[in-house]
Image (cartoon, rainbow, N blue to C red):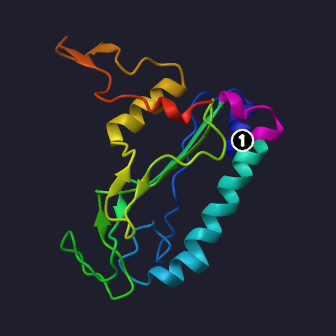
């Protein structure tokens, strides 16, 4: 459906992770049962859908002009069973972890197959080419043709920079 919206000329399409009522299929928020949920639910739902969207856009010559971004709001704790936010995690669950996370971006001039950055061996912290969320947002703005340093004015007519971040230009071909 997202591809069809792009084909029809929609300029912005957002696909949210489904929340299924009365079930544990509600997000990547895997405080309990991580291994089973990833194997049986989350990965089998995300992987083919994302891959198909990118392939379909590419086959129709729409990927070069379309930016696809896939990310969550934060990472997951590097150790199972660790509580970092007061949540009740079982031994096979991970808590919230804002210090290191992953994003997938494709299209709109992004180099194909490029991996940017690296975390330590436990996924606790970035150790090579870290990207702050503000830099990711600046990169998204850059990819869609907006200068991330554009000055905008709030409701009180006060000037604000659109985002305080630098685009990661190394991502682009």
Of residues 109 and 4, the one nearer the viewer is: 109
User: Which quadrant holds residue 126?
Assistant: bottom left
Q: Give the range drawn in magenta.
A: 57-65
Name the spot of residue 122 as percent of width and height, x first. Answer: 37, 70
Quadrant of the snapshot with the C terminus: top right
Of residues 122 and 54, the one nearer the viewer is: 122
Tally of numbered discs: 1
Is 24 positioned to the left or the right of 124 in the image? right
Name the spot of residue 133 as percent of width and height, x first. Answer: 34, 42
User: Which quadrant holds residue 2?
Assistant: top right
Q: Main secondary structure of the magenta part?
A: helix
Is 164 positioned to the left or the right of 67 in the image? left
The residue carrying mark 1 is 3
Identify whether 115 is placed above or below 12.
below
User: Which quadrant holds residue 4?
Assistant: top right
Name the spot of residue 132 as percent of width and height, x first. Answer: 33, 42
Q: Does the magenta stretch include residue 60?
A: yes
Q: Regarding mark 1 in the picture, which secondary structure is present there?
A: helix
Q: What residue is at 65 percent from the left and 47 percent from the top?
A: 113
Q: What residue is at 53 percent from the left and 19 percent from the top?
A: 145
Are there few (<14), some (14-19), or many (20+) residues within 10 Å of tag 1?
Answer: some
Is 39 positioned to the left or the right of 61 in the image? left
Of residues 61 and 172, the one nearer the viewer is: 172
Q: What residue is at 40 percent from the left and 29 percent from the top?
A: 138
Q: Is residue 39 magenta?
A: no
Of residues 111 and 107, the one nearer the viewer is: 111
Name the spot of residue 95 as percent of width and height, x first. Answer: 31, 72
Q: Which residue lies furthest to the right in this view?
A: 59
Q: What residue is at 37 percent from the left and 63 percent from the top?
A: 120
């Amino acid at each position: 459906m997202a591809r069809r919206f792009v084909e029809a000329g929609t300029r912005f399409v957002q696909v949210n992770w489904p929340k299924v009522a009365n079930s544990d299929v509600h997000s990547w928020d895997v405080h309990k049962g991580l291994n089973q949920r990833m194997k049986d639910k989350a990965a089998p739902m995300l992987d083919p859908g994302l891959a198909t969207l990118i392939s379909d856009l590419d086959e129709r010559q729409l990927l070069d002009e379309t930016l696809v971004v896939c990310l969550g709001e934060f990472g997951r704790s590097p150790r199972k069973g660790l509580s970092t936010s007061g949540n009740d995690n079982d031994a096979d669950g991970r808590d919230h972890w804002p210090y290191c996370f992953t994003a997938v971006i494709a299209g709109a001039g992004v180099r194909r197959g490029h991996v940017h950055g690296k975390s330590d061996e436990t996924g606790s912290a970035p150790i090579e080419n870290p990207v702050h969320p503000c830099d990711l947002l600046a990169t998204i703005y850059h990819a869609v043709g907006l200068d991330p340093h554009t000055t905008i004015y709030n409701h009180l007519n006060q000037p604000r920079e659109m985002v305080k971040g630098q685009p990661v230009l190394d991502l682009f071909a």
